[in-house]
Image (cartoon, coloured by chain):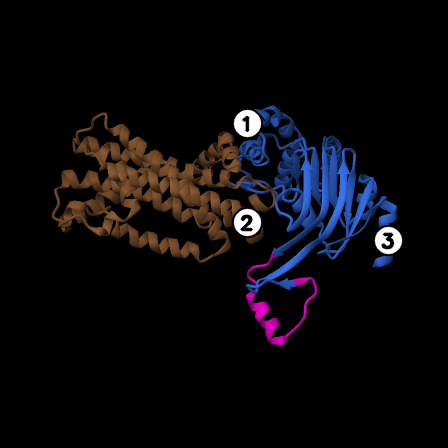
Amino acid sequence: MSLILDAVKKYDAWLYLSLADIRLRYRRSALGPLWITISMAIFSISIGLVYSQLFNAKMDTYLPYLTVSVIVWTFIAASLNESTSLYCDNAPYIKDLNFNVFSITFRALSRQVIILAHNSIVILGVLIFFQVPVSWTIIYSAAGIFLLILMLVPVAACLSLIGARFRDIGQLIANILQVLFFLTPITWETTFLQEKSWIYIYNPLYHFIDVVRAPLLGKSSSPSSWLICCTVVIAAWVCQEYMFNRKRARLAFWI
Amino acid sequence: MISIKAKNVTLEYPVFGMTQQSIKKRVLNVATGGLISNSAGIPIVRALRDLSFELKSGDRLGLVGHNGAGKSSLLRTIAGIYPPTSGQLTVHGRIVTTLNIAVGLEPEATGFENIIMRGILFGLSRAEIEARIDDIAEFTELGDYLNMPVRVYSSGMMTRLAFGVVTSLNADILLMDEVIGTGDANFIRKAEVRLTNFMNRAKVLIIASHNEDIIQKLCNKAMLLSHGELRAIGTVSDIFLQYENER
């Protein structure tokens, strides 16, 4: 726990590094980080056009739904995918500098948050274009994002630690996430199914996406979703504490 | 009070990615010294055995020994990177290591940006970096190059930058694996002065080196390591005498 607090205290360090990462990645391109926004807009509009035909859904409700879903999903999937090789990729930081591992995790996650912020411009555009009624309940969405990040920190840290020891984890997680993209209500809505289904009910990622998504689309997510999210967050932190207390010291030997 | 206290410190670590070799060994039934295997069959190296010593303010310790004697392992253990398998190690003071002074150098970032990033990586706050950025820039003599991306630098220029940042730090305990330098002929005197100041600011200096002259010059104590064991600790000339005899 003291390591996490230390990393939180030194927020200006990882924040500077993550901003620099994004700045450097797009330094020599004319549009710069705007490319993040553009690619996401192109991606969601094109699969929106195809899938709305496929599912026979109305464009003005389906496209906002899809855009929000895909953007939140991309945030989750990219964070988790990156995490599995994070400590290996940063081996010199850990082995030569004794750099706080949580600062490494925070740097990676804040990079993803910056990308999410760029992508949310697309959400804004879509909401305005389709005149989705937006009210003050949108604040729930921010709470949802906060819960999501609170879940991603311990989960990503654990995956990084496991990924350092077992190098197959990266491939495994990438495959699981690929399948989950189709199994989670992202491109399809829960109403497309005849009844409440186990297909999504038992999928925690559905609940995490829904607490962000529903308020943005002028709906509200069920209290049970919030409850599940909070439970998962607590469980994830407990797991993280347990795992890091037992194995973090070994990390330098694994990478 | 700046100090390092080691009591019966032993360090063992697993070596992964050796499966092929170990299978071969099992087939050939070759016994290996220094390597032991754990129950899962992962080879374990005993890098340090039962080390006990104490260092306090003013100590300049030279680590002497063959390759693989445990010098770097000891530096990493003191730095808190490797946890001792058994024994106690107590370290009081702010540690700076120069194991790898160019970690995380970003080729696309400018010299100035790299100075800031390197400062952050070595644990400085933004204010501390801002306070010494002029001094570092002046030392490197890179001038307008500092506004250019580091990828256009020659390797000598990159070393100067990395060297300039690390030597601006204030360490209580300084751990060096071989002496760092700039390797730049015209620059060598200036770098030496800066390095000396850097080392003098440290209360405790531990330096691993194969170069006897360097240890003679910089250290007031030496430690002879062999196969992870502490053979002797004493004055530099005594230790080198013993090292010569054992060789």
Instruction: Please report, as a chain letter, where disc 1 is located.
Output: B
Amino acid at pointer 2: Leu
Circle count = 3
Residues shaded magenta: B14-35
State which tag comes first along the sequence, 3 or 1: 1
Within-10-Å neighbours for mark 2: few <14, some 14–19, many 20+: many
Instruction: Please report, as a chain letter, where disc 3 is located.
Output: B
Kindly identify which residue carries mark 1: B126
The numbered dot on residue A251 is 2
Kindly identify which residue carries mark 3: B242
Q: CA distance from mark 3 to mark 1?
A: 47 Å
Amino acid at pointer 1: Arg
Q: CA distance from mark 2 to mark 3?
A: 36 Å
- Asked if the residue under mark 3 is in contact with the one under mark 2, i.e. CB atoms within 8 Å, the reply is no
Give the percent coordinates (x, y) of residue A164: 50, 52
Camera sees residue A26:
no
Give the quarter of the image for residue B117: top right
- Asked if the residue under mark 2 is in contact with the one under mark 1, i.e. CB atoms within 8 Å, the reply is no
Give the percent coordinates (x, y) of residue A13: 51, 32
Camera sees residue A125:
yes
Q: Colour of chain A?
A: brown
Q: Quadrant of the C terminus of chain B?
A: bottom right
Q: Disc 2 on helix, strand or loop?
A: helix
Q: Is residue A254 magenta?
A: no
Q: Output the letter for the chain in blue.
A: B
Q: CA distance from mark 1 to mark 2?
A: 28 Å
In this view, the residue in front, B135 or B64, is B64
Give the percent coordinates (x, y) of residue A11: 48, 31
Instruction: Please report, as a chain letter, where disc 2 is located.
Output: A
Q: Is residue B30 magenta?
A: yes
